[in-house]
Amino acid sequence: MSTEVRVPTLGESVTEATVATWFKQPGDSVAVDEMLCELETDKVTVEVPSPVDGKLDEIVAKEGETVGVDALLAVVAEAGHAGASTEMEPRKAQHKEDTAPGQEEKAEAAAETETATKPDKASDGATGGDAIDVMVPTLGESVTEATVATWFKAEGDSVEQDEMLCELETDKVSVEVPSPARGVLSKVLKAEGDTVEAGGKLAVLSSGEGAAASGAASETPGKAAAEADTPARSGKDIEDAPSAKKLMAEKGLSPDDVTGTGKDGRIMKEDVLKADACSSGDAAAAPAPAAKAAPRAASPAADADREERVKMTRLRQTIARRLKDAQNTAAMLTTYNEVDMTAVMELRSEYKELFEKKHGVKLGFMSFFTKACCHALNEVPEVNAEIDGTDVVYKNFVHMGIAVGTPSGLVVPVVRDADAMSFATIEKTINELGRKARDGKLSMAEMQGGTFTISNGGVYGSLMSSPILNPPQSGILGMHKIQQRPMVMDGNIVARPMMYLALSYDHRIVDGKGAVTFLVRVKEALEDPRRLLMDL
């Protein structure tokens, strides 16, 4: 007896999905509620479980295909049913005729690995082990492809289980691909720079003790000697930042050439840049030639020889596209004001030590600005709304986006329900998201759903700017450098710590009055933080 597996209900207003990944292949045994495949919609990822115990008889919808609600995905032959095993054979035979040779071999190999009583299983490990496919992991909601950025291992290298094999770049985050087992990387199928789809095959791994021993024995004497002479950086298993690994590979540096300043000696990208600058400085210190080189002729061809062309990362391409789309789509306008930071700075100075002692996190400016913006958004809700076709969607919550500059580009992690958080919770959340952003560890969920954004250009020294909207949001606040300026107070000229504020907004939904009112409310809350406590 066979049971059909169909596309479940995908959610309100969602009528179709894409088959992202099959976790099982035809012939594989499955248990009831065990995950068979994963579907991706434009909003969520949906897992499809097996409705019964049995074997996966046939896959109807392949990876990458678009399916509607209640469409047939696969057929499962139920276990324990009379005649189920006899029904399987003609079905498998028919499936074998309709399936590409590579896929059929993969299915047969998967079926064979389930039989634990195979007498030649042990001998397989001694001769190189089982072949295991290294697949592209799920990349996140609405992300279907990535670019292979860096291979940390080469063909023939021995690898441990969960050791990083390569790094993929999507248009939003970097994804590390670990080894599924211990063994030898026998074949790399996708080179650096290649584009891969979710669920695609990256490499083939030969697993087992025998394979690992074989890989170790095949290493060149020079490589083995070099590794023997290289001491471990520490007794801990330290995973360096992905951006640092990539840069070390580009610069030809090893971890022993770099002093890590991160936690437990973790190597960051800045450490690699510093080590490379030192080595370049040593090279520059060498005796210069006696004769100075003649200047090059002024021509485009001569200049081209000194240029370097580097392909934009997917993240940078996405940033460029989204920023230009925001300019082309929204009726963007910016209004400005300035705020006296005296009250905030005095309050912070008075309580920062007590705050850190109690909450374990430093009291920064971002929690004040986040609270002030939440307060202002409550009074001017259209700044916290978005346009959807001919509708205006008002958000009765605040998911605050905090723009963070990283080595790979600008990302905007989201502090969810910031309006319901305390100062301490906001500071802790921002610190954690900022650390993940710099290490390339942000998940898709942590960068989606923002309703308003704060961008602090002041940390880089910016005195004034007009930030660009983060669509589909209707407002973004730009913070800037705090600078002592002469101000007239009670008829006297005094020096005060002032900051320019800029609110860019979508004039299609936010009128000038609302934008100015919002910025004035932020200014008032910062110049007198007691207003936040009294909800004034």
Image (cartoon, rainbow, N blue to C red):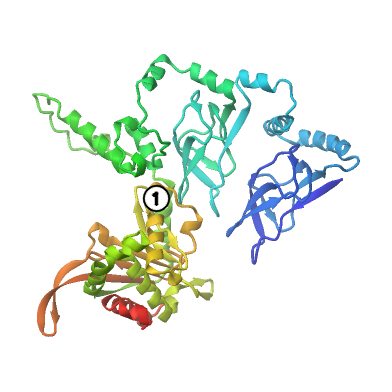
Q: Is residue 36 left or right of residue 464?
A: right
Q: Residues within 10 Å of mark 1 (few under 14, many from 20)?
A: some
The residue indicated by pointer 1 is 316
> Is the N terminus in the top left, top right, bottom left or bottom right quadrant?
top right
Q: Residue at x 71, y 50 (%)?
A: 49
Q: Residue at x 39, y 60 (%)?
A: 428
Q: Residue at x 46, y 18 (%)?
A: 219
Q: Residue 139 at x, y = what percent?
A: 53, 48
Q: Is residue 160 left or right of residue 455?
A: right
> Is the C terminus in the top left, top right, bottom left or bottom right quadrant?
bottom left
Q: Residue 167 at x, y = what percent?
A: 46, 39
Which quadrant holds residue 349?
bottom left
Q: Residue 8 at x, y = what percent?
A: 71, 57
Q: Residue at x 55, y 54 (%)?
A: 142
| Nearer the observer, 48 or 332 | 48
Callout 1: SS: helix
| Nearer the observer, 294 or 525 | 525
Is residue 311 placed above or below 475 in the rendered structure?
A: above
Q: Is residue 203 left or right of residue 77?
A: left
Is residue 10 placed above or below 144 in the rendered structure?
A: below
Which quadrant holds residue 379?
bottom left
Can the viewer see residue 458 in this picture?
Answer: yes
